[in-house]
Image: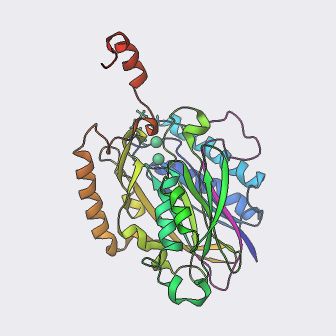
Amino acid sequence: MKVTMSVIKADIGGYVGHSDTHPEMIARADEMLAKPKQDGLLIDYHVTKCGDDLQLIITHQKGVDNEEIHKLTWDIFIECTEIAKKLKLHGAGQDLLADAFSGNVRGMGPGVAEMEFDERGSEPVIVFMADKTSSGAWNMPLYKIFADPFNTIGLVIAENMHNGFAFEVHDVKESKKITFNTPEEIYDLLVFIGAPSRFMVKAIYHRDSGNIAAVSSTQRLALIAGRYVGKDDPVCIVRSQGEFPAVGEVLEPFASPILVEGWMRGSHMGPLMPVAVCDSTPTRFDGPPRVTAAGFQVSGGKLIGPRDMFADKSYDLARQQANEMADMMRSHGPFEPHRLPLEEMEYTTMPQVMKKLEGRFTDLE
Ligand code: F6R
Ligand code: MG
Ligand code: MG
């Protein structure tokens, strides 16, 4: 059977500051999805959070970019914004950049990752959710999962994966896309995805079958709004097992924390820490950035789960390393590479300071 999985999320108010999502919002979102499920619009749903982002994980049979599904999630975000306003949560409605729904939540602020697939005999799916970072944060993990044999031994020794995967990459500044075949084009691919603030892995396909393997949200809020309105805090859906990497291969990249952009005021680099959902509460210098992983067996479209994949003790060392990396980055204070390069910073006082000091700049000899 064909199933569509839609993961649609928004930060519509933080509790306290930008550190968490209020339980009342999660409860209301849950309530609002019960009726559409009863009525058959949805097969199933799970509401969760990653830091200050409300996450709606939905299965249905309407295909991607479906107006009814998108409208439903938009209405939930609007309704939960009312709760945020009532409780005076921080930044109520911050990700809702449009006044009224117009057919699709894409480009309206919420982050969206959706895929339609033919459900297999066993369909394990991992939904990754991150807070205090941007969509490019998935580039390195996705590369490791689907193209690096040092991470995914299946690429070498599993016959059904040996022909590799195709990476669809988006240039979010120029609004262009290109597809690279791995393994033969990995050097070309890395030229682009190694610059994750501009080039982002949008989707990955199994080359032999053409089946979709992964999809990520690539919305850049700042590019949509034309100003800083909060970080993208991206999501990503990855299918696993069989012709796709095993669950352990899908999770393995997160055992070695990497530096990503988006910490404090969207303007700092910091380590991406894998955590259980209950620990997705970035409070140290509004961080460090977090990633959670909800694992499901999809059965007739029903979401069997979630299992909180990073609750496993085997990520304790990664968390410890991330904390040490956080200390090291913090010791740079307002200096790069902790602070982002000027052109990547989400907001800066540079224009005002420049203006004030205009007359004091003189030419070099
Ligand atoms: C980072 C983030 C926070 C805020 C910071 C200032 O992605 O969300 O670090 O940028 O707390 O928040 P405002 O401007 O809402 O006071
Ligand atoms: Mg926030
Ligand atoms: Mg957030």
Quadrant assignment for the C terminus: top left
Residue displayed at 71% across by 51% down: 70
Looking at the image, residue 191 lies above or below residue 84: below
The residue sitting at the front extreme is 365
Left/right of residue 201 with respect to residue 134 in the rendered view: right
The front one of 267 and 236 is 267
Quadrant assignment for the N terminus: bottom right
Left/right of residue 274 with respect to residue 40 in the rendered view: left
Is residue 60 in view? yes
Is residue 82 in view? no
The front one of 280 and 343 is 343
Left/right of residue 32 with respect to residue 245 in the rendered view: right
Looking at the image, residue 204 lies above or below residue 346: below
Q: Position of residue 22 (x, y in %)?
A: 46, 47
Q: Position of residue 115 (x, y in %)?
A: 68, 65
The front one of 235 and 92 is 235
Question: Which residues are drawn in magenta?
Answer: 97-124
Write down the quadrant of residue 18 in the picture.
top left
The residue sitting at the top extreme is 359
Q: Position of residue 347 (x, y in %)?
A: 44, 32
Write down the quadrant of residue 276 in the picture.
bottom left
Q: Residue 107 lies in magenta, yes or no?
A: yes
Left/right of residue 93 with respect to residue 150 in the rendered view: right
The front one of 172 and 285 is 172
Residue displayed at 33% across by 15% down: 361
Q: Quadrant of ligand 1?
A: top left
Write down the quadrant of residue 343 in the picture.
top left
